[in-house]
Amino acid sequence: MIETGTLIIVMQFTKGITIENGASGLITVGGALTLTALLVKPIINLLLLPLNLITFGLFRWVGQAIALFLVDFVLPSFTIKLFEFQGFKSDLFVIPPIFLRGVLAYVAFSFLLSTITTFFRWLIK
């Protein structure tokens, strides 16, 4: 259930994802994301294979965006309204605040979820 852990991390740093029913809703959404990652993403990635080959895999997040949209469409307790990141400032670098709505919110969340999930899977191997 890497997707559930990743979802918890993303919800700590951003706003815009709403999950009803507390922990049981979170587990349901995590399970749905896991199922879509196992069943739907391979088909989507196969369809997007030429684009992934041209960009050296940079468009793998598109499969995550479609899976995220499907989970949002199927589960009424899970909604994505906007992507709101308050920004980050340190001595070395600054990440400005980001506010996105609609399709761009799905893209931002999918990119973030895909990046963190890939990192966790790399750590496990």
Image (tube, helix red, strand yellow):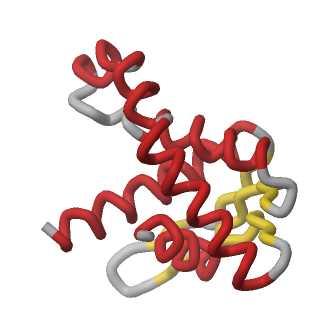
Q: Residue 51 appears at what percent x and percent y?
A: 34, 17
Residue at the (68%, 41%) spot, across then down: 69
Note whether residue 7 is visible: yes
Residue found at the far top of this picture: 50
Residue at the (61%, 82%) spot, across then down: 12
Q: Residue 125 appears at what percent x and percent y?
A: 13, 67
**Position above or below: 4 against 112:** below
User: Which is nearer the eye, 71 or 57?
Assistant: 71
Note whether residue 86 is visible: no
**Position above or below: 20 against 116:** below
**Position above or below: 49 against 41:** above
| Horizontal arrangement in the rendering, residue 80 relative to residue 55 (left or right) | right
Residue found at the far left of this picture: 125
Q: Residue 45 appears at what percent x and percent y?
A: 38, 28
Q: Residue 88 appears at what percent x and percent y?
A: 53, 78
| Horizontal arrangement in the rendering, residue 53 relative to residue 17 (left or right) | left
User: Which is nearer the eye, 3 or 62?
Assistant: 3
